């Protein structure tokens, strides 16, 4: 049986990499090389397109035996400037290919209050379909995440609910359009992660492994305030995997029963630094080995 490979995503260093620029990508690679992972998922917000930069970063990854399998992108396909968002996604597809990656994330876009469900579905599906030729040309699979909210967005994800995700899957039946499943995000849609998995399991090809806790209040409190602030609500916390709300035994059992082995499981850990991230990697590695023995 194939075994999922493990990647790490720098959730705990996003502002340092993207906003404050107090951490460089080479520094992240050096730090992450101590985690014992197979690859590093990159985020479009800290990438460059200069060929010399790409060559340098590829060499640094190669020196540590690391791949860049997945590029985490946040196209805003509900934007009025949708052509520009499509163009950005196509450039991100090309950038993924430049690193020999295979998976490039797509999102639906922000849940703007003036957009009806049908308008949103038509707009988002059309945009994703417009990107599929480039995905074919560059041998890239587009992965739709059951997402909550990009770090730097105002509104939550348009296709946050499993009902809307199912509608997109039904509309776009294409082998280059698959699912990146994130169990933690289901809680923020007011849904059970295993219920969401039942909807998407036949299209899951990659995963984000994460865990979530509420620092105070309830999920309903979170949903009531989610339109009022850029990024994540203060009551929400990413945390060490295995110590939060998710049941990874049930998740991996469900995927295995469905005949789905994720190609990559990318660790999207909390805000407490490299030691916590390492513990999360170790936890997910043990669960992968348990449920998907080599």
Image: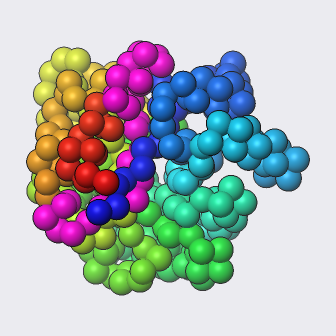
Residue 189 is covered by the magenta coloring: no
Instruction: Write the start and end of the magenta stretch as one range.
Output: 255-282
Say which quarter of the image contains residue 214.
Answer: top left
Q: Is residue 115 left or right of residue 67?
A: left
Q: Residue at x 35, y 23 (%)?
A: 279
Q: Residue at x 31, y 75 (%)?
A: 169
Point out the residue furthest to the right here.
52
* Residue 120 against residue 245 in the figure, above or below: below
The colour scheme used here is: rainbow
Residue 150 on image: x %, y %: 46, 43
Residue 145 seen in this snapshot? no
Residue 143 on image: x %, y %: 44, 63
Residue 281 is covered by the magenta coloring: yes
Q: Residue at x 48, y 37 (%)?
A: 37
Q: Residue at x 54, y 25 (%)?
A: 34
Residue 246 seen in this snapshot? yes
Q: Is residue 19 left or right of residue 171?
A: right
Asked whether 28 or 150 is in front, the reply is: 28
Asked whether 159 or 257 is in front, the reply is: 257
Q: Is residue 204 left or right of residue 221?
A: right
Q: How many marks?
A: 0
């Amino acid at each position: 049986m194939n075994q999922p490979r493990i990647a790490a995503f720098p959730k705990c260093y996003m502002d340092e990499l993207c906003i404050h620029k107090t951490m460089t990508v080479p520094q992240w690679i050096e730090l992450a090389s101590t985690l014992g992972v197979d690859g590093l998922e990159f985020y479009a917000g800290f990438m460059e397109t200069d060929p010399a930069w790409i060559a340098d970063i590829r060499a640094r990854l190669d020196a540590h035996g690391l791949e860049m399998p997945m590029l985490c992108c946040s196209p805003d396909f509900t934007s009025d400037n949708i052509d520009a968002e499509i163009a950005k996604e196509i450039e991100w597809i090309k950038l993924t290919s430049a690193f020999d990656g295979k998976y490039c994330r797509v999102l639906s876009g922000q849940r703007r209050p003036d957009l009806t469900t049908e308008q949103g579905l038509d707009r988002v599906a059309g945009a994703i379909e417009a990107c599929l030729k480039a995905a074919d040309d560059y041998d890239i699979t587009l992965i739709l995440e059951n997402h909550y909210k990009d770090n730097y967005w105002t509104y939550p994800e348009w296709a946050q609910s499993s009902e809307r995700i199912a509608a997109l899957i039904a509309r776009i039946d294409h082998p280059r359009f698959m699912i990146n499943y994130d169990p933690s995000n289901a809680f923020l849609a007011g849904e059970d992660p295993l219920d969401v998995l039942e909807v998407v399991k036949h299209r899951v090809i990659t995963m984000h492994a994460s865990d979530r806790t509420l620092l105070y209040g309830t999920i309903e409190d979170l949903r009531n305030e989610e339109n009022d602030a850029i990024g994540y609500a203060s009551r929400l916390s990413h945390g060490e995997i295995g110590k939060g709300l998710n049941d990874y035994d049930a998740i991996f059992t469900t995927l295995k029963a469905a005949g789905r082995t994720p190609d990559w499981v990318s660790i999207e850990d909390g805000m407490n630094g490299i030691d916590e991230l390492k513990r999360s990697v170790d936890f997910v590695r043990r669960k992968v080995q348990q449920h998907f023995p080599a």
